[in-house]
Amino acid sequence: MKAWLFQDHRQRQKLGDKAPWSVGWLDPDGKRCSKRIGAKSIAEKFARKTEGQLAAGTYNATTRKAWAQFRTEYETKVLKGMKPGSRMAAEFALNHFQRLIKPARMSAITTKTIDAYTAARRIEKRTKGKEAPQVSPATVNKELRTLRAVFRKATKWGYVAKCPEITFLREPKKLATFVSPEVFAQLYSIAGKAVEPAGFHAPDWWRGLLVTAYMTGWRIGSILALQWADVDLDAGTALSRAEDNKGGRDQLIDLHPLVIEHLKKLESFKTFVFNWPGDRRQLYNEWHRLQELAEVERADGKPYGFHDLRRAFATMNADRLSADALQLLMQHKDYQTTQRYINMARQAKPAAHNLFVPTLSVAAG
């Protein structure tokens, strides 16, 4: 592949022999490229270098590629194929990056750019107002993980020559929250006062949901997506579809008899096992109302989330199941995620609980 030297005719007319020299070439995609160099000797060296890169397949054409061009391609080829929740999280991260950095050329995005984004994002407020809390390190790290995946793809597509290094913020080590057996018993009992979903026997609906979540460890999204067509109450199994779980694969799960007992009370001609006809926000409102009636709350004063039921499953079963079985039931794609839950369970159940306890007696005085 040849590169050629030339002088702009207008510059030639104006400056004569002193007009700067430029180099032209065709990139691997057949696009005509050029660069003004200056002296002819330097232009000749640049031409030979470019020819060598084109011949060796090491040519990199990232310098002129724009952020807007990359984002459009990324949204078309990657984001559209994501599940709704993951796509929304990725879009949030990209929007924040674009808002704070205002990137133009992809070649200008470096490790320093990512560090600048992290520094700007970590001091922002979650909501408006002087007393509003700052964005948490966990939130910033979640966005950084998204950006890492984004720029790895940009590197593969040739938009950047090298993927920027990303340094994550240190997160405070907090004990994870989960629904203890005592709290679960209170919630199960108070479910008798549930009034939504309307048109169903709400107490049975909520007790079925609670038992299913507590004894399968499934995410709330997977539970609400479960269809009667994928449940075999006689065989005691449920099929979790790949499109409804983060594991990304179909999984046939054996259900505990207690779960089956509760699901039988919900049998209907509806498509979904846990049919919720209203807005998803109403689901959370009813969930929080039941907790208020039961007079339960987390140690931090906040209401329990559905994920606290999932953490409870991991905590209560980490010592009862093998790591492989726990990974399968919790539908984790990566074993490292399962290991984090196992570590969380060990924190929740301190080793001191397993210590030898001597027999004590009080001597008669």
Image (cartoon, grey):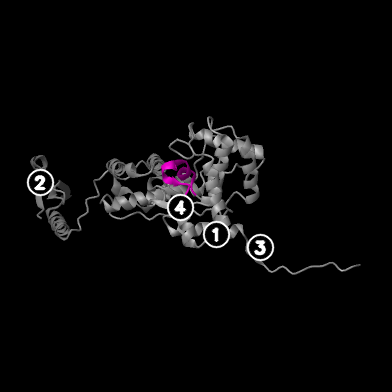
Q: Are discs 1 and 2 less than 8 Å apart at CB?
A: no
Q: Are discs 4 and 2 less than 8 Å apart at CB?
A: no
Q: Nearer the viewer, residue 34 or 361?
A: 361
Which image quadrant: the C terminus?
Answer: bottom right
Residue that carries the numbered disc 1 in the rendered image: 318
**How far is the residue under mark 1 from the one under mark 4?**
18 Å
**In the rendering, at what x and y percent does residue 337 appear?**
46, 56
**How far is the residue under mark 3 from the one under mark 2?**
82 Å
Tag of residue 7: 2
Q: Secondary structure at mark 1?
A: loop
Of labels 4 and 2, earlier in sequence is: 2
Residue that carries the numbered disc 3 in the rendered image: 353
**In the rendering, at what x and y percent does residue 270 appear?**
45, 35
Which residue lies most toward the right here? Answer: 365
Which residue lies most toward the front here? Answer: 234
Of labels 3 and 2, earlier in sequence is: 2
* Mark 2 burial class by Cα count in 10 Å: few <14, some 14-19, many 20+: some
**How far is the residue under mark 1 from the one under mark 2?**
73 Å
Of labels 1 and 2, earlier in sequence is: 2
Q: Amino acid at mark 3?
A: His
Q: Nearer the viewer, mark 1 or mark 4?
A: 4
Q: Which residues are magenta?
A: 218-234
Of labels 1 and 4, earlier in sequence is: 4
Residue that carries the numbered disc 4 in the rendered image: 253
Q: Nearer the viewer, residue 223 or 173?
A: 223
